[in-house]
Amino acid sequence: MLFHSVEFFLLFSGTFIGYWLMPQHRLRMLWLLGASFAFYGSWNPWLMFVVVFSAAFDFLIAQRIETSPSPKARRLLLIVSICVSLGILGFFKYTNFLLDSAVSTFNLFGFDYRHPAFRIVLPLGISFYTFETISYVMDVYRGRLRAERSFMDYALFIMFFPHLIAGPIVRPKHFLSQVPRAKRFDWNRLELGARLFLLGLVKKTVIADHMPAIVDPVFASPSEFSTEAVWMAVLCYATQIYCDFSGYSDMAVGTAHAFGFKLPQNFNLPYAACNIAEFWRRWHISLSTWLRDYLYIPLGGNRHGTLATYRNLILTMLLGGLWHGAAWSFVLWGFYHGSLLAAHRFFSSRSRSSEGPFKPMRIAFTFLCVCIGWVLFRAQSMTDAWLLLRRMFIPTEGQMFASAEVAIALAAWTAVLLGHLVSSYLDMRSALRWLPAPVMATGMAVVFLFVQVLMPHRGGAFIYFQF
């Protein structure tokens, strides 16, 4: 059930009407939880048991941690909770990857062994809700949060359907503090939510869903395309993954506003970043801050010297890359970004401010580094990634794209560039606030019709659903 599908519109409409017609707050929360189960169950009802088990286990563990008088017992419970959460994630996501890697290692030493392929169905959103359960238990262990006593409230924190499948990764204190508050219908908030949802819809359907026609052929057969075509595909993939993922986040935040909930911002003009550290403060913010608070800082952060800081940066991003998928290309992508962060930290004390006449050059260089990383992220194999990178920087002849594809790419790049420029220099939220309601409603209706005309006939699933 995709956000831009008729099925989702029907589910949202029924949930929205019933939610605001109910007189009691607790009934509203129960209604919202039921809608979340219906949303997740529409993909695969059997996999709901995985989510429920994970939520129930950590719900009980957190209560035991809070009431246990022994520091050793509390630490043991925390370790058990993390091991169970990561064990479930590892089984569903990494079983075949680890077996393939082990077999490849054995074969290097002359063994000829084949293992049966396990047909494991990956539960949607498992990487996201696993991080949320881990952060909840760790916050209770650290004394930053009281253990929740209402399983319904905790289940809603995990299952809330706008962010369930692909984030943003919600912090327990931020969300659980909102659940007990009585909600009042607010037209201004509903308008904000509708605008955010419509913005995300434009990003996803009008821009991102047109990019696979250019991206997929090149990444499927990189040896057949010229240097110009490879560059075009890489830039289109950078456009696609940004518009696809930030579009989902916009729609998730907008949907949450319709029910009186606030989710965290997940993107903030990432391609306008002046360096790689700033890029990660702007891209997938809920993940980068999670990795910082629950992995980088516990590893030691920058508290134990320069070399340890570089090690922690690389290890954090390496594990962040592995979180994205069960493939060595994701591990290499994480190592690459960790190395860039370490290099930035090394040179930052020796460089000048990112402001001034060199700022456009810094932005362009950062974007180039990110695009090189996207090749590792998107390539189907390490061999393909190396071939693509060679063709990017060594002029090579091959197939070119037709003028129609070039026009689509130019239109998409222009839209993203203008969006970054307008949002960087204008306060659009304040500007839109001055528009009369009829003008705003008419404009949104026109944009919605614009989406219906320009969206492809077969829109794909969101990229981050696979993670």
Image (cartoon, grey):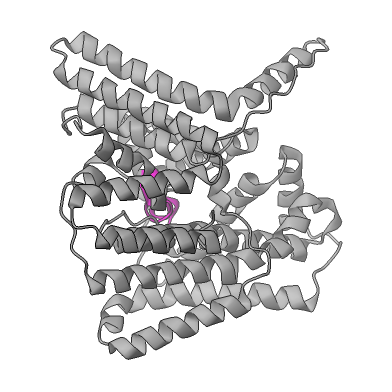
Give the residue displayed 31% in from the left and 42% down from the top: 156
Q: Is residue 467 above or below residue 436?
A: above
Q: Nearer the viewer, residue 342 or 352?
A: 342
- Which segment did they paint magenta? 273-288
Q: Is residue 345 above or below residue 13?
A: above
253 on left or right of 325: left
Image location of residue 195, percent across then percent down: 38, 73
438 on left or right of 92: left
Give the residue displayed 42% in from the left and 67% down from the top: 197
Image location of residue 237, percent across then percent down: 63, 59
Quarter the C terminus occupies: top right
Q: Nearer the viewer, residue 445 or 382?
A: 445
208 on left or right of 178: right
Q: Residue farthest to the left? A: 69
Image location of residue 106, percent across then percent down: 74, 13
Image location of residue 45, percent across then percent down: 52, 38
Q: Nearer the viewer, residue 305 or 27?
A: 27
Give the residue displayed 18% in from the left and 12% down from the top: 71
Give the residue displayed 22% in from the left and 24% down from the top: 141
Q: Is residue 149 magenta?
A: no
Q: Is residue 432 above or below residue 391?
A: below
Q: Is residue 277 magenta?
A: yes
Q: Nearer the viewer, residue 309 or 282?
A: 282
Residue 75 sits in quarter: top left
Work out whether residue 303 can be spotted.
no
Q: Main secondary structure of the magenta part?
A: helix
